[in-house]
Image: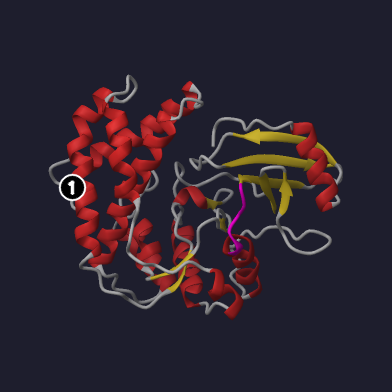
């Protein structure tokens, strides 16, 4: 979220210091991410250590809290897991919010910079190892399971009606509304045709924006907020689609990824379903955010940029998810 939350940052810093037993010398808001219910801070401690603080309105899911640490213990080294509290557990309450504290990694995301050849291979290696991990019984009990029943189309219908009559989105909806309703129908049609393949642990948002690296350094995988048990195409969609990151896959990068991942022949119907469903979900969430009367002009402009980018892709006569 790029708008600051309505919290007293001095109280927040004191809460983090007491909960994780660190002496905080600086807490800086980071305007990153598109999740309207989550905020990020960079935390500096007196001993020179730096941390990444994630604050969510409501609570993190049990899977989001437990899975990263489990994967690290299984040897999936790229995972950035939350730091345990001294008294056990990883999440801590703060009023209407819940907090997770992570190690801070330099370098920034790879959305704009792209991956090096070596990192494309590591990207494949990471996903191959992730998809090979068998969840423990405790984790399997809390991980959501793919149902192929998206609610994005249901969310789009009322939001589209509001967009059509709003000053901010009226012209946009007149131009793209029909294409977005066709997208909702496409998602339903693809859902009826998918093959219910074997489920694996999926990150479910594994685009380059959630890969952190310094130059050609090792990958650090962040944002484990919505893992799911699903076919591996749930994650592979982000690799084989052209929509995520400024330097998407090509034949050379696909070969580097395959060398790291291992043999794979993704199911094309599943890839199409996940690509179109992600587009539809992002459209519904962007509309909701733009129509929120409390959103700042900067936040609305950011959401409208991404919304228009998706709408232009979907409205293109050659669009084929």
Magenta-span inclusion, residue 69:
no
Residue 176 placement (x, y as % from top left) = 21, 34
> In the visual, does 51 lie left or right of 194?
right
Nearest the eye: 256 or 193: 193
| Image spot of residue 135 (x, y percent) | 55, 77
Q: Is residue 162 above or below residue 193?
A: above
Residue at which label 1 appears: 319
- Relative depth, front residue between 306 and 6: 6
Element carrying mark 1: loop
Q: Which quadrant is home to the C terminus?
A: bottom left
Eyeballing the image, is 165 above or below 110? above
Q: Which residues are magenta?
A: 58-62
In the picture, the quarter occupied by the N terminus is top right
In the picture, measured across the screen, residue 74 lies left or right of residue 274, that is right
Going 14% across and 46% down the picture, which residue do you hit? 318
Is residue 241 or residue 216 the one in the foreground?
241
Vertically, is 309 above or below 239? Answer: above
Answer yes or no: is residue 321 visible: no
Residue in view at x 78 percent, y 38 percent: 13
Please indicate whether residue 304 sits to the left or right of residue 160 in the image: right
Whole-percent x and y of residue 136? Answer: 59, 79
């Amino acid at each position: 979220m790029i708008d600051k939350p309505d919290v007293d940052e001095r109280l927040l810093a004191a809460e983090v210091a007491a909960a994780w037993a660190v002496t905080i010398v600086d807490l800086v808001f980071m305007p990153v991410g598109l999740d309207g219910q989550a905020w990020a801070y960079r935390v500096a401690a007196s001993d020179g250590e730096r941390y990444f603080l994630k604050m969510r309105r409501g609570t993190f899911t049990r899977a989001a809290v437990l899975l990263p640490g489990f994967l690290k213990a299984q040897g999936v080294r790229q995972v950035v897991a939350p730091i345990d509290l001294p008294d056990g557990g990883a999440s801590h309450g703060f009023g209407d919010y819940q907090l997770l504290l992570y190690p801070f990694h330099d370098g920034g995301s790879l959305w704009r910079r792209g991956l090096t050849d070596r990192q494309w291979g590591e990207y494949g290696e990471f996903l191959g190892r992730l998809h090979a991990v068998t969840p423990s019984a405790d984790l399997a009990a809390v991980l959501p399971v793919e149902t192929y029943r998206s609610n994005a189309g249901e969310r789009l219908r009322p939001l589209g009606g509001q967009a059509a009559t709003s000053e901010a989105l009226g012209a946009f909806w007149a131009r793209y509304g029909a294409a977005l309703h066709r997208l909702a129908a496409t998602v339903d049609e693809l859902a009826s045709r998918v093959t219910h393949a074997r489920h694996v642990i999926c990150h479910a948002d594994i685009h380059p924006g959630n890969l952190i690296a310094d130059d050609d350094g090792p990958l650090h995988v962040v944002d484990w907020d919505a893992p799911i048990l699903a076919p591996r195409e749930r994650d592979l969609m982000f690799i084989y689609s052209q929509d995520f990151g400024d330097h998407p896959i090509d034949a050379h990068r696909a070969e580097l990824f395959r060398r790291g991942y291992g043999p794979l022949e993704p199911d094309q119907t599943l890839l199409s379903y996940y690509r179109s469903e992600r587009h539809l979900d992002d459209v519904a969430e962007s509309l909701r955010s733009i129509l929120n009367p409390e959103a700042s002009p900067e936040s609305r402009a950011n959401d409208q940029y991404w919304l228009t980018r998706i709408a232009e892709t979907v409205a293109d006569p050659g669009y084929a998810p």
